[in-house]
Amino acid sequence: MSTICATTWIKSSHGANEQMSGPVIKRIAILISGRGSNMIALADAVSDGTIPNAEAAIVISDQRDAPGLDKARERGIEALVIERAGRTRDQHDREIVSALQSRQIDLVCLAGYMRVLSAEFINAYRGRILNIHPSLLPAFPGLHAQQQALEQGAKSSGCTVHFVDETLDGGPIILQREVPVRDDDTVESLSDRILVEEHKLYAEAVAKVLWQNRGR
Ligand code: GRF
């Protein structure tokens, strides 16, 4: 991972300016397509120190009207739209990767980002792209995970944070949390309870990955 160091200059006892390095600050990008509640949970976790030594550096949306964009701006986070409309997947991803690289991003968090990434994007940030999914993977990958759980009569579901690779929701799992399914659950009620856990789990997973990569 590339690093940005908080650096302080101090006057030494013999009068020379000496450099004192603070903690390495990892720069996080969060990609969204819509509401952005996981993005907010991550940004707040950075602010309150649940994710230490990190900065929510940019939010990128592939949808111009994603409600999460304004929420990011309200928090003082740069919010950029790179619309998928009118671009091939490769063109779109190249523009995103270029925006990430120009801002020296260390870690990319997909948070309700509804476009499958190209191989080029994955290769550019391999092992440094995370996603959150509302099921206990490998159960119920893809769209409508909560509906799949209800239709298949699952007694429990939950959420998973995993690394992104070329498979659909199949990359190495970082953390999971179980959420029981109730007999009277609807897609909405189950989604709401899973979402509460998603917000906590994603912050924990990001903190874990950054800790494991400290010094890199
Ligand atoms: C979440 O349920 C997440 O697990 C899934 O998409 C939803 C995004 O919600 N990938 P939000 O935009 O973070 O509120």
Image: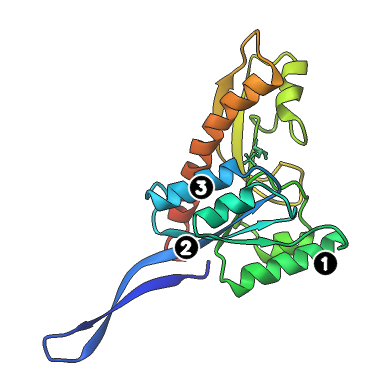
Q: Quadrant of residue 17?
A: bottom left
Q: Quadrant of residue 108?
A: bottom right
Tell which of 107 and 72 is nearer to you: 72
Tell which of 152 and 171 is nearer to you: 152
Measuring from the top left, give residue 128's x and y in whole percent. Answer: 59, 58
Which residue is located at x 20 percent, y 91 percent?
Answer: 16
Q: Which residue is mark 1?
A: 91
Measuring from the top left, give residue 63's x and y in whole percent. Answer: 75, 53
What amino acid does circle 1 point to?
Gln
Q: Nearer the viewer, mark 2 or mark 3?
A: 3
Q: Is mark 3 within 8 Å of ligand 1?
A: no
CB within 8 Å, label 2 to label 3: no
133 to 116, vertically: above or below: above
CB within 8 Å, label 1 to label 3: no
Graded by Cα atoms within 10 Å as few (under 14), some (14 to 19) or many (20 or more), the crowding at tag 1 reads few
Instruction: Work out whether residue 173 can be spotted.
Output: no
Q: Which residue is mark 3?
A: 42
What amino acid does circle 2 point to?
Lys
Give the mark nearest the N terminus, 1 or 2.
2
